[in-house]
Image (cartoon, coloured by chain):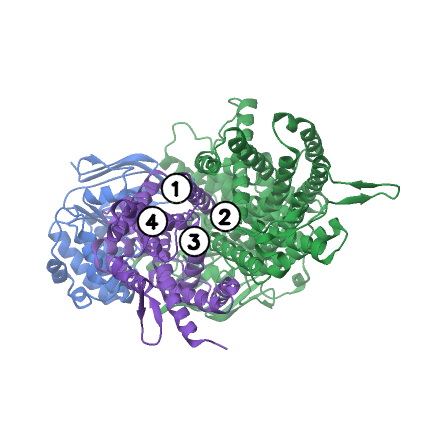
Amino acid sequence: MSRQSPFVVEILTAIGLVAAAFILPYVGFSPTTMSRIVVWGLFGVGFDILFGYTGLLSFGQSAFYGTGGMIAAYLLTMVGFPHVLMSIVIGTIVAAVVGYLVGLIALRRTGIYFAMITVAIAEVFYFVEFNPLSAYTGGENGLPGVPTPTLPLGFTTIRFNTDFSLYAFFAFWYFIGIVIALRIIRSPVGAILSAIRDNPLRAAAVGHNIHSYKLTAFVVAAAYAGFAGGLLGVLQGFMPPEAFTFDTSGQLVIQTAIGGAGTLFGPLVGATVWLYLSDFFQNTLHLGATWKLVLGVVFVLLVCFLRRGLIGAIKDLYELATRPRAKKEPKETTPIPGMTAEEEQKAAHIEIARGPAPPLEIAKEPPPPMPARHRAADDFTGPILQATGLTKRYGGLVANSDINFTVNRGELRGIIGPNGAGKTTFFRMLTCEVPPTSGKIVFEGRDITGFDVTEVCQLGLTKSYQVNQLFARLTVRENLTISALAELRGKFRLDMFSRLQNISGLAEQVERTLELVDLTGRADVAVSALAYGEKRRLEVGLALASSPSLLLLDEPLAGLSPRERIEMVKLLRSISQGRTMIVVDHDMDSLLELVERVTVLQEGRVLVEGTPSEIKSNAAVQEAYLGGALAA
Amino acid sequence: MINWGNFISQVFNGVVLGALLALISSGLTIIYGTLGILNLAHGAMFMLGGYAGWLAYTYTGSFIVAVIAGSLFVMLVGVVMERVIIRHFYSRPHEDQLLVTFGLGIVFVETIRFFFGSLSKTVPPPHVFAGITSLGFMFYPTYRLAVVVIVALALLALYLMLYRTRLGMIVRAGIEDSIMVDSLGINVYRIFMSVFGIGAMAAGFAGIVNAPVVSIAPDVGEGILVQTFVVVVIGGVGSFPGAVLGGFIAGEIISITSMFNPGYSYVMLFVAMTLVLVLRPYGLLGTAGR
Amino acid sequence: MSLLEVKDLNTYYGDSHILFNVSLNVKRNEVVALLGRNGAGKSTTLKSLMGVVTPRTGSIVFDGAEISGQKSHLIAQAGMQLVHEERRIFGSLNVEENLILAGLTAPNRWPLERVYAMFPRLKERRTSRGTDLSGGEQQMLAIARALVREPKILLLDEPFEGLAPIIVRDLLTTCRALAEAGQTILVVEQNITAAMTLADRVYVLNNGHIVETFTAEAVRGQPELLHRHLGV
């Protein structure tokens, strides 16, 4: 979507909305039905940003729909405020503010908790509207007498008082809503929202304040709901209290799922299907109330079998039709014919055993090493990382006790230790994933004890994960963009209307990282289509794209074939130029060839520290690894 | 001025409602704890129990038969639902699980509406529990008192089932670590099915027992579902004791607030939920990770 | 004919390739040790056998029947038991419930008295909940829970890890007694001393490949045989 020429979608939308006015009446849609579809569609645009793009399934959107609509209707009918549009805008603002407050509570948890909390909150609104505030909201009668909008042009005044002109009014605002939504999802904020949907943990780890972004999406969705609620009052001539019911939220969810979430247009398609079928079943087939049963069954089948809704299904069909058999699985590595795994592995050892490549050869490697970002802190001359007295207890269990650990700028350090030595805990404390029980961590002269992963990433310390943590539904380029954005924009910025392309330095940084991890040729492939070795390189690339000054790598070789290991070691060596790195890995041979110094942990303490050759000849280390018996 | 008689009778109402909520929420929470599925059709299960019981009652005139029929029917629905649909959603994202159970809830409600219409149905309380009882300081509907006892017995039965039987042992073990249960030669999929059936039955049983108190209608489960959510958020998702405690807390909040203004009962419930979320994010008796 | 015959096993976590064409066999009444550095794929091998992770390709013939790709509970019913590295005791169940649960579907189950005779400590703590046990007690319970089912083969994953030396000694004595009584065992262990006092035969695993196999006598005579793959 981001690659096509500008405004295609916008223009098609405008054409579609105009064309619908002339075509749909002939296939059985009344202008009122069309208006209702458009209002539901607009309501859904905001919801889709929340659910389809950010991955937050709310069952409580009725709260904002009702609030926006009630405020607007109240101003128009009870206060006697004459400006229809102005009232709707005020309703929208109130809905957004309410959305902000509700979001503060609901977003404390994710997943099913989030769904349950939104349901509960919406129910509160419903009851408050019905009872304590019935003097203002009309209680179960709603607020009748909402006027139709007018547009004074000086010489004349356009009145939207026919069914058809009202459709034009609503379609216009739907169009505006789509233009704004497209702008948002193409902005850096939109990119980050998708990243949060795919992998919130990693989005936070590359340096984004995901809570603020989620709250942003929640407020945007509330504002859309509020605006649509205002339009609903205009459409019906009165503000129905049913807007507040759980059924309203449910219908929105259903329509979005039917149409296809994550498409912006899904809710419109879903509303078309839902409202058309409900008219058809009731008026043509005279099914009475049974229509909802039929639609319920259809919905369940759809969730079971068409997971991406109608738009998703159409896209899949289109892709099937346009490129038959063109889909080729990427080959992981070309296996050497006749070479068994053992032989391959031996070959790997031989290659590694050649020792570190001379520095000259590295300088000749095609991608120029990407510089770590320059910061004020670079003038700091002490050790880049210094941990003192680091201790971690889990209940009675001491995982790490009193570890002192110093890494100098430019160093390439390895950490090893037998099982249960506390490497994982130690590493997680350094990356601020878990806070130490006691002790202090200083990074570039700054005490970072108690910071979270987002903050330390912003300072220039990040890690690549043992198990790939990628943004699965995005392309390779988009993945790296997410990470680079964190460095270029900081942990939170509300540039919802700026374009990704206009962020200076972004494209260069992404290209450079692509080259560095050798994925330039695969830049526009979705992550799900990558081979494992490529994903592993992207995993390192994600950490790299935020140009950290200290990069920690958690088992970068895990799961790689012997040949891929050789490539990865080469890659790590090349990115270590001008950067400090700490590596944990189980592949002792590769690790000891790669790093300059090694820290050996045993039973939660530092056993010894030294160069690889010192470590190899150290009796205590041998004993730690062999359990004492055979060394003795 | 507070009317003390009224106050005490509302406290009693709170106990009745709390007991019901505790039972329904236990079903929801056991299912979630073991299977990881939040069943949005759980409110519909409550409603189905009421209708199945009502139907049995109209044919037999026996309240006992109604209770048994209501519970067993809903258990059957739960088992079939797990086997045919839910089983295929264990490995799918939470959102899909929510959508499908939400859709199934609609199907259940609309099916009932199709067969029995939207008008509410009543089941009279059994003769022994008809009328009102004098508690010395006030009069209280006998059946409501009976509901507390019946539901308490059901909760006790659920407790005994969970903590004193082999099946319960397996279920508790399964809530903790279903893979290990499987490694010990026990077919966890069959356990999942039973748990879904038992959890649904808890809701169905509550549905028919509650029928003489509040008449049944197709959408009676909707409000109950929302209250159940608040209960498990307060008590801690996946915790049986949490569901019981949360149920009584929610029941009292709703009843006592209703005395002043029913419109605020949800507000107070919500305030309580927010407080719990802020102070103990995993619920009063819940543990992190669920 | 071996009790357990594994051929060309390949296991993945997602698309991460962990085991490469692992082949091994264990004869009846034999104790085999699987050695290797951490991350070599030892635990994954045991989990693949037990069906906790499903191997992508390869065959596992156990007691004459192909079991690869089967569900765990069927493999357990066929007579295999895995004692997990993390022990996976049910914390909300007490000791006795843990044991009863394990025996529910076993064709020949040990009477509790036999278990308690082997682990007197567990008898003392029979009503304690799993969460209240010490590490050593948990390990005893984990082994006892597997033994209750009278498994044809017992898979032990790092049974001595993180335990005090005196407890390791006791457990080792128990395991040796089991072995002498004819229990077939496949053990993964980092503590090579402990492993070598049990094993008749050794496989060495490195980066997901079986790289060597020795008899126990060979290793005892020439300990440096293991250094290449296990040392630093």
Disc 2 residue crowd, few under 14, some 14–19, many 20+, Cα 10 Å: many
**Dot 3 or dot 1, earlier in sequence:** 1
Tell me how far mark 2 sits from mark 4, CA to CA: 45 Å
Q: Which residue is mark 3?
A: B225
Q: Are marks 2 and 4 on the same chain?
A: no
- Which amino acid, by three-letter code, is at mark 1? Phe
Q: Nearer the viewer, mark 4 or mark 1?
A: 1
| Above-or-below relation of B180 to A267 | below
How far separated are the C-alphas under marks 3 and 1? Answer: 21 Å
Q: Chain of mark 2?
A: A
Alpha carbon of mark 4 to alpha carbon of mark 1: how far? Answer: 14 Å
**Which residue is disc 2 drawn over?**
A469
Q: Please state which of residues B98 and B180 is positioned toward the viewer in this rendering.
A: B98
Q: Which chain is purple?
A: B
Q: Mark 3 near mark 4, Cβ–Cβ under 8 Å?
A: no
Q: Residue furthest right?
A: A155
